[in-house]
Amino acid sequence: MTASISVLLPLRSATPFLGPALASLQAQAFDGWRGVLCPVGEAASALAARVAAADPRFCVGPAGASEVAALALAADGIDSEYLCVLDPDDALAPAALAGLHATLAWRPDAGMAYSRHVLMDAGGRVLGPGPLCELPYSPEALLLDWMTGPLRLLRTAAYRRAGGYTDAHPDAIDYDLCLRLSEICAVVHVPQPLYLRRIHAAAPEVARWAEGIEARYAAFVAAVRRRGLDAHYDTALQVDSWHILQPLPAQ
């Protein structure tokens, strides 16, 4: 029987928090899921094989040279109605998949549902609510603030219609995908905090902080052009990483 939700887990060379991440998935109240382990590089394939051997609910996807390649390859091969990504540094709340699945079942016009999240440190101590997740969503607001992360449940059909994961902006693959999804389907916000995002020195968003800012800005500029807004607005990036969209001077 095909699982309703494919949960993609990118496995990098260093995965010190993989155990808690897997345990949080195995403890889900919603049991119609299948874990797809996405090795980043051949070295991670052996780890993926050990995880899959220990729990038949997991399978191993093709190894990719980068995280975006591994995720894209895995997503190409799934046949579930929904997909989401669980970073191996992070953890799901027990009701995460159930809550997001129920939301998309209630909203057949929506292609993505996302929840609030909380931040935790390397030791698992909760630091507080995630930034930006309290902001109201709209396709226009998403241009200026990335409020749709990090837990998102996508309809697989919407993911593929939007073009899926690409390497156009390697340090902003999720933001880029969210922007493209916002242009083709409705997006629903689940107000409960259903995800724990772990912040530590080796986390990609910390280790590649500057690269992430530049990549998100490039994805923003690409979205402005796709939407035809560049005919009326100029773009800029402030030092504190705010995206600016301002009217062009009168001709």
Image: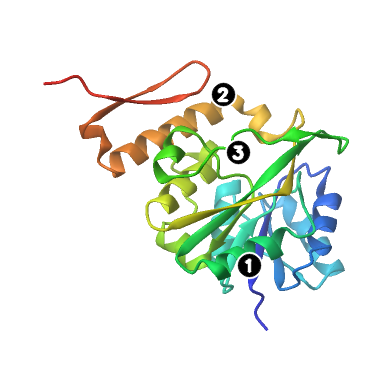
Q: Residue at the spot x=77%, y=71% of the render?
A: 57
Residue ranking furthest to the top? 239
Q: Which residue is mark 3?
A: 134
Q: Amino acid at mark 2?
A: Ala
Residue 37: x percent and y percent?
Answer: 70, 60
Q: Do tag 2 and tag 1 residues touch (Cβ < 8 Å)?
A: no
Q: Nearer the viewer, mark 2 or mark 1?
A: 1
**Residue 36 seen anywhere in this rendered image of the structure:** no
What residue is at 68 percent from the left and 84 percent from the top? Answer: 1
User: Which quarter shows the C terminus?
Assistant: top left
Residue at 41% from the left image edge and 35% from the top image edge: 220
Q: Nearer the viewer, residue 207 or 186?
A: 186
Q: Is residue 41 left or right of residue 221?
A: right
* Quarter holding residue 202: top right
Q: Of marks 2 and 1, which one's residue comes earlier in the chain?
A: 1
From the image, tell me which residue sits under label 2: 210
Residue at which label 1 appears = 102
Secondary structure of residue under mark 2: helix
